[in-house]
Structures are given as structure tokens and as C-alpha cells.
Image: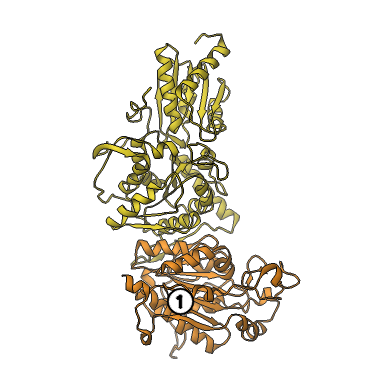
Chain colours: A yellow, B orange
Amino acid sequence: MSTAAITSPTRGATARSEPPTVGRKRLVKGNEALALGAVAGGADCFFGYPITPQNEIPEILSGLMPKLGRVFLQAESEVASINMVYGAAAAGHRAVTSSSSPGISLMLEGLSYIAGARLPCVIINVQRGGPGLGNIAPSQGDYFQACKGGGHGDYHSIVLAPWNVQESFEFTKTAFDLADRYRMPVFILSDAVLGSMLEPAVVPDEFPPVERPDKDSWAACGRGRRLHKNVVNSLFLRPEDLAAHNDTLQATYAAARREIRFDSRFLEDAETVIVAFGVAARVAYTAVTMLRREGVKVGLLRPVTLYPFPTEPLVAASSTAKRFLVFELNAGQMVEDVRLAVNGRRPVSFYGRMGGIVPPPEELADHIVAMATGEDGGAS
Amino acid sequence: MSEVPSTAAACECDLECVFERPDAMNDKPMHYCPGCTHGIIHRLVGEMIDEFGLIERTVGVCPVGCSVFAFEYFNCDFIEASHGRAAAVATAVKRCDPKRFVFTYQGDGDLAAIGLAETVHAAARGERICVFFVNNGIYGMTGGQMAPTSLIGQKTTTSPDGRSLDISGPPIGVCEMLASLPSVAFLARVPISSPKNINVARKYMRLAVRAQLENKGYSLVEFLGTCPVQWGMSPINAMKYVDDTVTGVFPPHVFIDRVSPAKNVPTPVEAAT
């Protein structure tokens, strides 16, 4: 079954929709789309350190960014990369880095400082298998890391999960606006399949400057004619001050719920709802379309923002569906958020593969049928 | 953001003012312990910002350690870095807008232990930043633990019998290590132990600032400072200890000077640009 059909724009109750990308349709690699998305989104600078399977991103940007008068710098480590992002963002610039799972782990201390100092930035994670050195095959094992903060303290990043090359471009481009709007980090959660695949996508050939908000009220960019100094900091020694600062952060995360996006297919009469994100959702969509042809009432709900999490559509679906199946390329991470949303109204089961294995849609379809049959005597 | 007091309060008498606070600094009481040299070195940084007229384009980067609150005492923009990463933060601030004057202010735990990789690579790349490195051979703020720069035999809370060569090796000479890097434009070490040496420090800092303003490369000035409280000494004895003992292990010296006119040879950074 071909997956090339899944290039239609995201459907569902998206909170915000961007104008269609102007450019030329051609074969684009996922990592290239992420790199071009950063450039189109107005990244002033990129700092990164090599790690597979995301190396095309720094390779492309090392040529493109200087040509556009922007900054590219290969850092000595992921630790340095994220602190360069911190510095650039603190000085008011649009900053981006990219890495893969182990490298993102190294960045988490810096990310906590970025969140604590209320700085906007974009972080691309082309996930690979873990834990430890793991392997360079596709995985979704970093859901917790991306969505639950990851580093120390109470903080979150907005997390966008593309499922094709076109979305890889568009989400990365949009991420810079989201980051600036809420002054918080935004993750693009890709993986080794999405990053390495070639498929048709519309990407621009030119990258004009983009509008961005004025940051002179808080950025440490040099005082200039400003009468007050700006200090970028996450240190609040008095408990009352740190509590108030945390209240501000939490209010920001609550406000960011306006940005919730999801995609739904065949939900209207679905008795079984598959919940999956990223590349797993592509496998699931193929399985769903196969089963629909056989008359099985199955649908797909695809969270696009993994944080903030699309709780409401799951609540709505739990009044019509009989059961949920969460499918992920990990040991079961998003399933916890799905269970919180469904809150016991319907059974939520989990199917996952680890180690970099992406099962064929037939395997998932068989599992869906077996689950539905075993549960209610084949009524579905 | 915080309000910047206009300038130093004008004297309301007829006497000529011969010494006042630099415009780059404010009159907040410092939190440093009695006899600590951070106050002196802060003042020297303020003097440099005034002397070169840099206040409007300066971004300072402060460390984690005793000088974590350095931003409180200056009137320029500041970024608080995580422990050891000031050089990486400063790198990005400078690269994104080379018109800025960017300096870091770091202690020896911050720069020579946890932040050594960032320090070496910023120097190796010839980042046009000034690093003001205060070496007092101990972790002051966390309670007097052994630093990478603690002397052999020095008693600290984590080397109660004195630093052992067998266990911890000899102290790290940051200047000696960085001196091998071609993109370093100015590198010097000076004790902050007497008015004479403070004047020497001023001279070095001017050259360090010029290294950046004249696009010659990376610069670092290492100040041999005191920590009377964690050393268990009176302020005066601490100064004496710097002169009599610390300078024996960390010799004061200009390691690299590619800024002074007498040495009018293009630096590798200049040659490449």
C-alpha cells in the first residue's frame, strides 16, 4: 500500500492555519525540509554538533546560512550548541539547533535555562533508537523527554510532530512564530524515517526576511539608546519571586493551549480509534484505510501538537468510539496522556515496537482486528 | 529589566572630584565577603567600559559561582550563563552582531573545570570576546571545595588533608594551556595583590579589549584573586599568600600579545579575514 497519498494538509480542528507554501514541488528529503523550514522561518543562526541521522540539516545550513548573511557555527558539543542558542536567543535573535536523541539529552540542562529565562528558540530532534547509544534507526522514544520538560524544574516546550516531508518544512517554519509568541522553546519531533525519506513537497527557492516581534523590552542585545538595562536570567533567590516566576510560566503554558492541533480520519462512525503521531500515524493510516476497505469501522486520531496535548478531541471521541488503541514506536509513552484524556470512559490499549523496528501496516491491521474480535466477539 | 541610575551622583561641594564610581557601574552594595578581590576586578571592568565608551553596545555574560550576581552591579545588558558555558553564550551573542562588545566574567571552577571545553574551543576559534577569568583556587560560593586550580597541599572542604598530587594531579594553568592556540590575540596573568599590580591589570585589560575592538582575536586576562573566608586567612594575609605562594605556581606573565604596536604581525584571525 502506498503512503504517498498522505500529503494532504492537516485536517481537524487546527487552531491556526498557515497560507500554503509558495515554491516548487520537487523531491525533498525530510532533513532538507527541516533545514529549509528553519531558513524560511527566519532563523538568524544555527548552532549544532554532528550526530546521525540528522546530519543533512547542518550540512545544508552550513552552505545556505552564510549566503543569506546569517550565522552557522559547528559547536564543540551539544552542550555548547544549546548554550549558543541560549546566548543568541537572549540577545534577541531567532536561534535553532538540531540533533538526535543522545544529543538532545545533552542539551536538556541548557533547555531548562532557556525555559527558565523565557527565551524563544527552536530545537529539532530527529529521533533514533535508545536508551544509551541505541542505534540510528527510527524511534519515538523521546516523547516523554520532549513533552514533559526533560530537564530540571517545572517547564514545557511546545512540541510539533510532523508525519511527512511537507509538514517537516511547514512546522519548522511556523515554530519560530510560536516560540516568539509565547517566549518558550519549540520542539520539532521528527525521526530517522521522516528525516531520511524523500517525497514530493513544495519548498521555496528564496528566503526573504520575515517579520518578527520587537524584543528590545527584554533582550540583552546591547542597551543602545534604551534607558534601562536588560538582564536575561533564571535566578530568583527569594522563594516568593521564584514562585511568581513559575506562575508566569504556567500561565504561558495554559495560554499555549490555543495552539493545539490534531488530525482526524474516519472518526465519525469509528468503533476503534487508533491514536498515533509522526511516522507511526502514517503506518496507522495505511492500516486504517486497508481495514475500511474490508468494512471495519476504524478511525485515526493524530495529535500534531504533542504538547499542548489535544485532550478535547479524545474526550469527544470517547463518547462515540468503543475502544482506543495507541500505537507508538516505543514502550508506551503517549498512551499515558491518552489514558488521562479518556479517563476510564473507554478501554485504552497499547501496541508498540521498539529498537528501530517500524512494523508494516498489515501487522498493525492484524492486531487491530484481533483486538476488536477478542474484545467483543467480532462485532466490529 | 531594571532601572539604570543616571550617572554617579554629583558632588555637592566645591572640592574637585578625583575618584568616583565608573559610569558603567551602579551604587548597589556588593554581596562579596570582606577582602574578596571581585569588587576590585568588577571596578576594573567598569573602567574599561567607560574608557572605551562601550556601554551602549556591551553585553556581559556572568557565570555561576560567587560572581553569579555580577549583573547587579553594572549598567550594561547582561546574560546569566549556566555553570561553565559563558564562552558558548558569548560566542553566539558576538557572532550574531559583531558590533557588540562582549565579555565574560568567570571563576576558576566555572572556567577551568566544568567549562573547560567551551573555554578552549572559543579560544581555538578566535572568538572576538574578552574573558575576564578570576582564579582564587577554590569554589567559594559552594563552601570552599577543591578547584582544578587549588594548589598541591591546599586544604579545602573536599581535600581535608591538602590537595594530593596522586589523587588530583597538579593544578591547571589555563594561560599555559591556551598559549598554544594561534587564534588567541591576548593572554596574560596578573595578581590582584597591590595597587601596582592593579595598574598592571588595567594595562592588560586595555589590550584585551583592543584585541576584540580591533578584530584581532580572542583575549583572556587571568586575575589571581583571593578568598580570605574559604582560605581561612585575614584579607591582608590572603593578599600576601597570593604574592608569596600562588604566583610561584601561576607565574604572572604576558603569554601572548598580538595587539601592541611593537608586535605588528597580523594574527591568524586577521590574516584569514
Classify B40 as above or below A257.
below
In the rendered picture of this protein, how many numbered marks are placed on residues? 1
Which quadrant would residue A298 be assigned to in this image?
A: top left
The residue lying toward the viewer, choosing from B219 and B195, is B219
* Quarter holding residue A332: top right
Q: Quadrant of the N terminus of chain A?
A: top left
Vertical position of residue B211 compared to residue A326: above or below:
below
Residue A125 can be seen in this image? yes
Is B218 drawn above or below residue B204 in the view shown? Answer: above
Question: In front: A24, or A89?
Answer: A24
Expressed as whole percent of the image width and height from the top left, the position of residue A101 reads 50, 44
**Residue A19 visible in this rendered orientation of the protein:** no
What's the residue at 56%, 73% (across, down)? B30
Residue at image position (35%, 81%) is B265
Q: Farthest right residue? A: B161
Q: Is B214 on the left or on the right of A255, as rendered?
A: left
Q: Mark 1 points at which residue?
A: B46
Q: Is mark 1 on a helix, strand or loop?
A: helix
Report crowding for label 1: few under 14, some 14 to 19, many 20 or more residues within 10 A (C-alpha): many
Q: Position of residue A182 (x, y in %)?
A: 42, 46
Q: Residue at x 36, y 70 (%)?
A: B56
The chain letter for the residue carrying disc 1 is: B
Task: Report the amino acid beneath label 1.
Answer: Gly
Decide which of A225, A316 is in the foreground and name it: A316
Q: Horizontally, is A103 left or right of B148 in the view? A: left
Give how far across and how far down residue B225 sits, in percent. 58, 78
